[in-house]
Every structure is written in structure tokens, then in C-alpha cells.
Amino acid sequence: MVSQTTLNRDPHSPAPEPELGRNSKGLTHDAIELCELQWALLSEDLKSAVRGGRTGGVLVLIAGAMLFASAPVLLLALAAWIETAFELSQSLSLLIAGAAAALAAFISLAVGWNIAARGAASLKRSRTEAQRNVAWLKQMIASKPACRN
């Protein structure tokens, strides 16, 4: 009969492999639990990234707004000073002032980007954990099922 237990009296013959159907409930439970844990880890990492990247983002925005607001006046004043101090033509003075402003903007952008990237680095933990979880699930699905109680 189907519902009866068979005894294996031959010690040399292997035990029958458990059916996948018996283990699918446990595997599904483990997969759902891993998804929940992964979501919780990602949520915490995002909170940490926002806290760490907030300062860098604010500095980049402030620097951009200040540069945008004051750039024309400062660049024209710098060009006029260069023209007077070094007896250069107006066009060359404007070029030098513009290049100096572009260099300062690039340095500000690089510093702000670096600070913001440090805050986003905390997401690496979630990515690494997700990769391990996916590898584990693939292994569980591909390998022969083990008996679960």
C-alpha cells in the first residue's frame, strides 16, 4: 500500500531519495524568509546610505547654487583684475578667469561626489548578501533534495 512504511532490511542498498514535493514547502518557507531578511537589510542599508550621503549631497547642492548665483559677477571681476594686473587683453583675461572657475567647480564636484559615494558604499552589504542568498537558492534547487522534518 502507498501509505505503509517500507523497511530496508538490506544494509548495502541505499535509502530511497526523498521526493521534491516533500521538501518544496520547506524550501519555499526558506526562500520567503530570505526575501524578508534581504528586504530588511536593504531598508537598513538605504537608511544608512541616506544618512551618510546627505552631507555630501547638501554640500554639492549648496556649492552649485552659490556658483550659479555668483559666477557672472566674480568671473567678470576676476577678468578685470587679471587684465589690469598683468596688462593682458580682455579676451585672454576672461579666458583665464573662466578656466579658473571651471577648475574650482570640478574640484568642488569631485569632493562632493566622494563624500556622497562613501554614504552609498553601505549598500555593498546588501548586494553581497543578496548574491549569497541567490547562490544558496540555486544550490538548493539544483541539488538533490535533502529530507526535512
Image (cartoon, grey):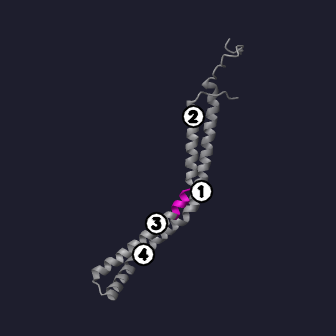
What residue is shown with label 3? 110
Q: Quadrant of residue 106?
A: bottom left
Tell me which numbered mark, 2 or 4, is placed earlier along the sequence. Answer: 4
Could you tell me residue 10's position as x and y percent? 70, 13
Closer to the camera: disc 3 or disc 4?
3
Badges 1 and 2: C-beta atoms under 8 Å apart?
no
What residue is shown with label 2? 139
Q: Amino acid at mark 1?
A: Lys
Tell me which numbered mark, 3 or 2, is placed earlier along the sequence. Answer: 3
Could you tell me residue 108's position as x and y percent? 46, 70
What residue is shown with label 4? 69
Could you tell me residue 42's position as x and y percent? 58, 50
Q: CA distance from mark 1 to mark 4?
A: 32 Å
Question: Could you say whether the residue bearing mark 1 is in a helix, strand or loop?
Answer: helix
Tell me which numbered mark, 1 or 2, is placed earlier along the sequence. Answer: 1
In the displayed structure image, the side of residue 116 where residue 12 appears, left or right:
right
Badges 3 and 4: C-beta atoms under 8 Å apart?
no
Q: CA distance from mark 1 to mark 2?
A: 31 Å
Dot 3 crowding, Cα within 10 Å, few <14, some 14–19, many 20+ = few
Is 132 colored magenta in this rendering?
Answer: no
What residue is shown with label 1? 47
Tell me which numbered mark, 3 or 4, is placed earlier along the sequence. Answer: 4
- Against 148, residue 14 (above or below) is above
Dot 2 crowding, Cα within 10 Å, few <14, some 14–19, many 20+ = few
Question: Could you say whether the residue bearing mark 2 is in a helix, strand or loop?
Answer: helix
Tell me which numbered mark, 1 or 4, is placed earlier along the sequence. Answer: 1
- Which residue corresponds to the image point at 49% horizontal and 66% vertical from the top-left? 112
